[in-house]
Amino acid sequence: MAYSCPGNVRQLENAIERGVALSGGRSQIEMADLTPEIQQASEAAATPDLNLPEEGIDFAGYVSKIEHELIRRALEKTGGNKGQASRLLNLKRTTLVEKLKRLEPRVN
């Protein structure tokens, strides 16, 4: 999903065909089955471009902001269902509820 596919449809088709061929009959294509260019794009998307300024950052605030965004997106994706959102985030439902209480002013 993160790969911009700068080539044409044929390039995308070849990448998918390669993935299917290397999947060995599995029902799902794994990242290792794709081309190195696509793998690198995925790794870059998973790690946001972080710049650490000379004066430093507010680590707790930054982490809290990311946590808030992940929770918001999970709730949005699940139509507000906390059980499903907690599964998406690999959290216990009670942990998600506690985090929501802590973040409540920002989530709503």
Image (cartoon, helix red, strand yellow):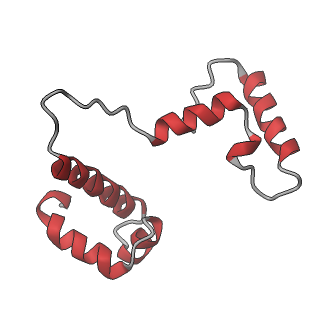
Where is the C terminus found, in terms of image quarters?
bottom left
- Location of residue 51 in the rendering, given as x and y in whole percent from the top left corner: 28, 29
24 on left or right of 60: right
At 37% across and 73% down in the image, what residue appears? 81
Compare residues 42 and 17 and report the one nearer the observer: 42
- Location of residue 56 in the rendering, given as x and y in whole percent from the top left corner: 16, 35
Where is the N terminus found, in terms of image quarters?
top right
The quarter of the displayed image where residue 99 is located:
bottom left
26 on left or right of 98: right
How many labels were placed on the picture? Answer: 0
- Location of residue 60 in the rendering, given as x and y in whole percent from the top left corner: 18, 53
The quarter of the displayed image where residue 47 is located:
top left
- Location of residue 98 in the rendering, given as x and y in whole percent from the top left corner: 23, 76
Compare residues 57 and 43 and report the one nearer the observer: 57
At 28% across and 50% down in the image, what residue appears? 66
In this picture, is 14 found above or below 23? above
